[in-house]
Amino acid sequence: MKSIQLAGPYDLRLAEVERPHAGPGEMVIAVRAASICGSDVRMYKNGYKHASEEHPLTLGHEFAGVIDELGEGVPETYAVGDAVCAAPNYGCGTCDACVSGNTHLCADYHAFGIDIPGGFAEFVHVPAQIVSQGNVAHIPEGLSFAEAALVEPLSCVFNGQEICGIESGDTVVVVGAGPIGIMHCLLARARGAAKIILNDLNEERVRAAAELIGDIVALPGEGLGERVMAETGGAGANVIIIAAPAAPAQHESLEYAAMNGRCLFFGGLPAGKSEVALDANLIHYKQLRIFGSARSNVRQFRTCLELVAGGNIPLGNLITKRYAIDDFQEAFDAAAAGTCLKNVIEFAG
Ligand SMILES: [Zn+2]
Ligand SMILES: [Zn+2]
């Protein structure tokens, strides 16, 4: 079968590898759509510890497809031919994090396309441990495979917004107008935010995103703090989400947070540049809360499937272009150049 493998920095290859089969408790999913994520692009540009010339890694943690093979003992809720997608992160299953449902926070965490073969391939092998943790979810009626693939990044956004607690009536600022920032805007609206302000240093990006989202306030460029204060009548924003790898944006967010405000540091910072100065007195006197979030759990993944299927989040609008696997290089180059929102690799059924 064909698979897209990373062997080092800027070294992605279309490889012919052995097709997987399902042992006891396992599954094989025939992939129909897999979307390129910012983290795939980072791994492509920088290389990755689990991807080498000797041990190339099949990338892809956002994918959907059809069950192609079922091993002995897989629960009867699954049948060959079912349309499914899979939450990529799984844990040991027995530690406190896993038992609390947060398998994505397990110290022994693994994931498709991160350290086991992922979805940029004609078939994906699903280990028994993943099947038993419930990661494989049926795609609700009305959702396309490409939309189902995009549910994974949305579930990470959902995790972040559960943690920082967007409430109806909140004014929300999102910094970063990429796919993740756009998903934050769409979800914040679905959760009842009264006003959503979107910022990015790239003005063109903000304008395009604002048009796609509709009915938000676009504030591109620098000097965001003063403009948020003006936009909110001096009150500041209730929730600020930094969905960009930008330390200055994290630093500045405390200044225009409202009293009792919440800041979510959603995007990771580049390695070696993650020390950020924060004004502790702003945190103290404004009674601010600062949160981090990373990845998502299986419950959040399944909830997001329902949310998208219910028509509350038009995820399909984020798809820029669809590619056949043979054209993977073009798809990755566009993603690396930032000239697209979500590029999707599609496979014929
Ligand atoms: Zn992703
Ligand atoms: Zn665990």
Image: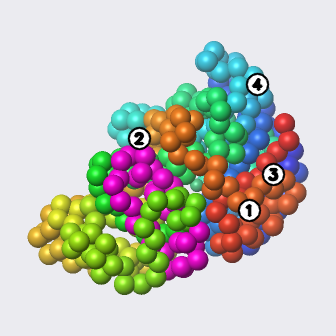
Residue at the spot of label 2:
102
Is residue 309 or residue 25 the one in the foreground?
309
Q: Marks 2/3: CA distance? A: 30 Å
Whichever of labels 1 and 4 marks the residue nearer the N terminus, that label is 1
Q: State yes or no: residue 189 in magenta.
A: yes
Mark found first going from the N terminus, 2 or 4: 4
Q: Quadrant of the N terminus?
A: top right
Which is more toward the observer, 141 or 14?
Answer: 141
Foreground: disc 2 or disc 4: 4
Amino acid type of disc 4?
Gly
Question: Which residues make up the magenta segment?
Answer: 180-208
Q: Position of residue 345 (x, y in %)?
A: 77, 52
> How dense is the environment of label 2, judged by Cα within 10 Å: few (below 14), some, or many (20 and up)?
many
* Residue drawn at the location 70% of the way across and 60% of the way down: 320
Residue 148 is marked as none
Spot occupied by residue 323 in the image (x, y as percentages of width and height) = 81, 56
* Disc 4 from disc 3: Cα separation: 21 Å
Residue under label 3, please give it.
3
Q: Earlier in the sequence, mark 4 or mark 3?
A: 3
Q: Nearer the viewer, mark 1 or mark 4?
A: 4
Mark 1, residue position: 6
